[in-house]
């Protein structure tokens, strides 16, 4: 299982993490955050381990960096309309593939459009918009690179069994596609997926895709990505800012360069969650024994605590700390061979995290931020129990 | 057009073939067997079809597909021609009534309409029952399956789906190698070609061997439909029965109901000689949902290779 950095704003942090700290297996390059000439200038070793997500999700996006790519629909047509694009879809596909092949990325990604609603002709639309033009152009190019098809879905789509089967029949109908690049907008109010049905539908869908002999690269993963390691997926992602750990199209529409300053959080792998920095300091200073059991140090986190000043969320250290630790968690799980053993290990982690949350509670520490609580863990536990049984 | 008149036309057209046997006739289509006029030992198949835009387009499509595939698993098309009214008039006018009065009169009064003709390789073949005769029946079936899937991988690789696989469309040569024929309703899956079944169940297929998606409206047909048909052929060859019931007994509604309820008969109960691996392979081909069938021809060939090794 490969771990890709889902790059976003400040993607030099991802590159530093991969190239300098040896974290992850490559990067999913985000053109909405990276100008074309910058991508062209990346060193060849980085590119050969990375992939380029063309990000056609919002084809009329006005984002400047996205429009530096001449194959992006809005740029190509000098104003995207669905009808006009029909005549240019092949040109866009040919240019985009040529770009991906020329830059020698690890594999090719066929983009897709994001549909918020479960439109009845979803498949026909995706086929006409990008899938068939790209496959046709890929065939002409005689490329030997593996091809992944982007599949942006919503949780509602996954929960609709008829729709799910239609999509499964469609994506498995191309012999030349190696895998899907799966992105799901869970539309969850909190930072973790706390709806069992949604998470269960996600896991079931991935299992079905794998059962159909198609690879799955799960994009925009938060900590729930750890569960996917038991599903024999091709890859999962790690990301810095929250909008790289949860898929939505906001960043293709809104300006995300001047984000509101959230309270800084620090990743606690033993809790399978992020905790507010202030709470971490409280545990560290007031409950040193508990700190020893709950905290996982890295050189990055140690540097923060040594400094003693509250880190700003725009500084990379918190994210480097996260990258290192979650990457370790993935790699530990990867070493376990059988699915059953992986599930047991994950269940053990969940159980351990719940016990630690209990210890925090018993110590009288108030996790007033709901996102830092372990409310997702019982859901994970139920899901892991379900994953241990055959699909029904 | 009768055999004599067609032979006469073939002579005028200088197609190098002379027919001597009508093999099949249906409406305005007919298949004849004949010999090369250059070499009497070379047998040929002659397909005749009265001109009709749809029908000729279908034959033309088949010829185009066969032209693009060079394999012993498919018949070779040597020549084909659309004989227009102008060509027919030219032929009739070229006959001098003074020297060939009877011939000229016969052609003029025969009211010959435009037609399409193709000259193809003649495939010597034996009935399936004879081919599978003997104690090594299962091994023979597996070998035929392997070769048929090798043939289909060529079609699928060219993004073509046959859509009407059934024993009569898979000829078995005396050396037990298969030849796939009748690609008249084969369909290109290349971009832009939509292929939805007709709401009135006019989908070109043979219901007894058709995949579930071929029998319901607005379904998309791809190479996985061929996998299902091959599953039915394999099941029938191994057990003498149909996997979801016999269409002739239970009709379309019964068949669709059995598909919906997943009433796949147990192949090993019907033939205890079928190994678990072979049973699992055939069952995978026969999954009602296409996504549960094989995704690659390579995966199918690999699996049959493993099944075949059970017999060595």
Image (cartoon, rainbow, N blue to C red):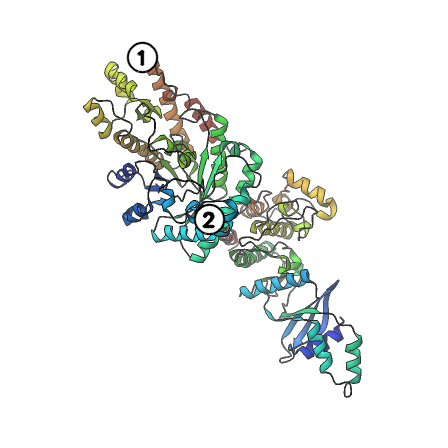
* Residue B166 lies in quadrant: bottom right
| Circles 2 and 1 on the same subunit | yes
Question: Residue B97: image x %, image y %?
Answer: 77, 85
Which residue has dot 2 on it? A177
**As rendered, which of A327 and B167 lies closer to the eye?**
A327
User: Which chain letter goes with mark 1?
Assistant: A
Q: Is residue A31 left or right of residue B309?
A: left
Q: Residue B286, how many percent across, how many down? A: 59, 46
Q: Quarter of the image for the N terminus of chain A: give it.
A: top left
**A330 above or below B18?**
above
Judge from the rendering whether residue A348 lies leftward or rightward of residue A386; answer left or right. left
Q: Vertical placement of B97 versus B290: above or below? A: below
Return the mark for residue A63.
none
Residue B124 shows in this picture: yes
- For residue A174, say whether it is visible: no
* Residue A371 image point, x, y percent: 38, 22
Position in image of residue B287 (x %, y %): 58, 43
Closer to the camera in the image, A26 or B53: B53
Q: Look at discs 2 and 1 and give the one toward the viewer.
A: 2
Disc 2 to disc 1, C-alpha distance: 53 Å
- Residue at screen point 77% across, 81% down: B104
User: What crowding class fits label 2: few (fewer than 14 Cα within 10 Å), some (14-19), or many (20 or more)?
Assistant: many
The image quadrant where one finds the C terminus of chain A is top right
Asked which secondary structure carries label 2, the reply is loop
What mark, if any, has residue A363 been given in the picture? 1
Q: Please name the residue shown 40% across and 44% down the image.
A: A54
Mark 1 Cα within 10 Å, few/some/many (few <14, many 20+)?
few
- Considering only vertical position in the picture, is B7 above or below B227? below
Q: Closer to the camera, A269 or B97?
A: B97
Q: Residue furthest front?
A: A78
The residue most toward the bottom is: B99
Badge count: 2
């Amino acid at each position: 299982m490969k771990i890709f950095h889902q790059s976003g704003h400040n993607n030099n942090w991802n590159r530093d993490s991969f190239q300098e700290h040896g974290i992850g297996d490559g990067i999913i390059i985000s053109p909405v955050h990276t100008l074309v000439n910058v991508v062209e200038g990346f060193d060849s070793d980085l590119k050969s381990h990375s992939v380029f997500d063309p990000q056609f999700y919002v084809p009329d996006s006005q984002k400047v960096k996205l429009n530096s790519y001449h194959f992006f629909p809005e740029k190509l047509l000098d104003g995207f309309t669905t009808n006009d694009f029909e005549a240019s879809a092949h040109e866009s596909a040919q240019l985009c593939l040529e770009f991906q092949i020329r830059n020698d990325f690890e594999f090719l990604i066929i983009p897709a459009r994001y549909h918020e609603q479960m439109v009845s002709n979803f498949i026909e639309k995706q086929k006409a918009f990008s899938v068939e033009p790209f496959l046709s152009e890929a065939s002409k190019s005689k490329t030997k690179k593996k091809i992944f098809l982007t599949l942006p879905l919503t949780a509602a789509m996954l929960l609709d069994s008829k729709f799910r089967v239609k999509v499964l029949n469609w994506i498995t109908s191309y012999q030349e596609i190696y895998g899907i690049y799966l992105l799901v907008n869970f539309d969850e109010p909190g930072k973790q997926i706390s709806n069992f049905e949604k998470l269960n539908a996600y896991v079931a869908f991935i299992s079905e895709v794998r059962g159909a002999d198609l690879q799955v690269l799960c994009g925009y993963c938060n900590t729930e990505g750890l569960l996917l390691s038991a599903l024999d997926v091709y890859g999962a992602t790690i990301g810095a800012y929250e909008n790289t750990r949860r898929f939505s199209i906001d960043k293709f529409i809104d300006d995300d360069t001047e984000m509101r300053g959230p309270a800084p959080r620090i990743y606690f792998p033993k809790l399978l969650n992020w905790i507010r920095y202030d709470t971490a300091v409280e545990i560290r200073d007031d409950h040193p024994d508990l700190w020893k059991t709950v905290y996982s140090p890295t050189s990055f986190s140690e540097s923060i605590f040594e400094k003693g000043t509250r880190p700003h969320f725009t500084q990379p250290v918190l994210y480097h700390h996260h990258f290192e630790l979650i990457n370790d968690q993935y790699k530990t799980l990867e070493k376990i061979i059988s699915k059953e053993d992986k599930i047991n290990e994950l269940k053990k982690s969940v159980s351990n995290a719940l016990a630690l949350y209990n210890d925090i509670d018993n110590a009288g520490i108030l996790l007033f931020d709901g996102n830092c609580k372990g409310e997702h863990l019982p859901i994970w536990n139920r899901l892991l129990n379900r994953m241990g049984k055959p699909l029904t | 057009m009768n055999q004599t008149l067609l032979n006469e036309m073939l002579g005028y057209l200088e197609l190098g073939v002379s027919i001597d046997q009508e093999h099949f006739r249906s409406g305005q289509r007919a298949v004849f067997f004949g010999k090369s006029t250059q070499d009497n030992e070379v047998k040929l198949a002659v397909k005749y079809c009265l001109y009709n835009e749809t029908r000729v387009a279908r034959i033309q499509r088949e010829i185009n597909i066969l032209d693009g595939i060079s394999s012993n698993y498919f018949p070779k098309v040597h020549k084909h021609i659309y004989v227009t009214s102008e060509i027919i008039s030219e032929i009739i006018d070229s006959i001098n009534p003074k020297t060939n009065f009877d011939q000229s009169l016969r052609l003029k009064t025969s009211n010959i309409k435009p037609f399409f003709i193709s000259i193809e390789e003649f495939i010597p073949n034996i009935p399936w029952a004879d081919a599978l005769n003997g104690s090594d029946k299962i091994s023979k079936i597996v070998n035929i399956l392997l070769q048929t899937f090798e043939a289909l991988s060529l079609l699928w690789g060219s993004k073509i789906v046959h859509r009407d696989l059934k024993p009569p469309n898979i000829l078995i040569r005396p050396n037990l190698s298969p030849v796939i024929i009748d690609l008249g309703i084969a369909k290109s899956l290349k971009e832009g070609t939509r292929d939805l079944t007709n709401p009135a169940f006019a989908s070109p297929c043979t219901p007894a061997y058709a995949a579930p998606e071929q029998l319901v409206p607005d379904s998309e047909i791809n190479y996985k439909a061929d996998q299902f048909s091959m599953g039915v052929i394999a099941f029938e060859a191994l057990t003498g029965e149909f996997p979801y019931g016999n269409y002739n007994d239970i009709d379309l509604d019964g068949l669709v109901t059995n598909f919906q309820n997943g009433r796949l008969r147990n192949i090993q109960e019907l033939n205890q000689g079928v190994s678990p691996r072979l049973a699992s392979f055939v069952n995978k081909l026969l999954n009602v949902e296409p996504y549960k069938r094989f995704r690659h021809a390579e995966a199918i060939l690999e699996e049959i290779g493993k099944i075949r090794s059970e017999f060595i």
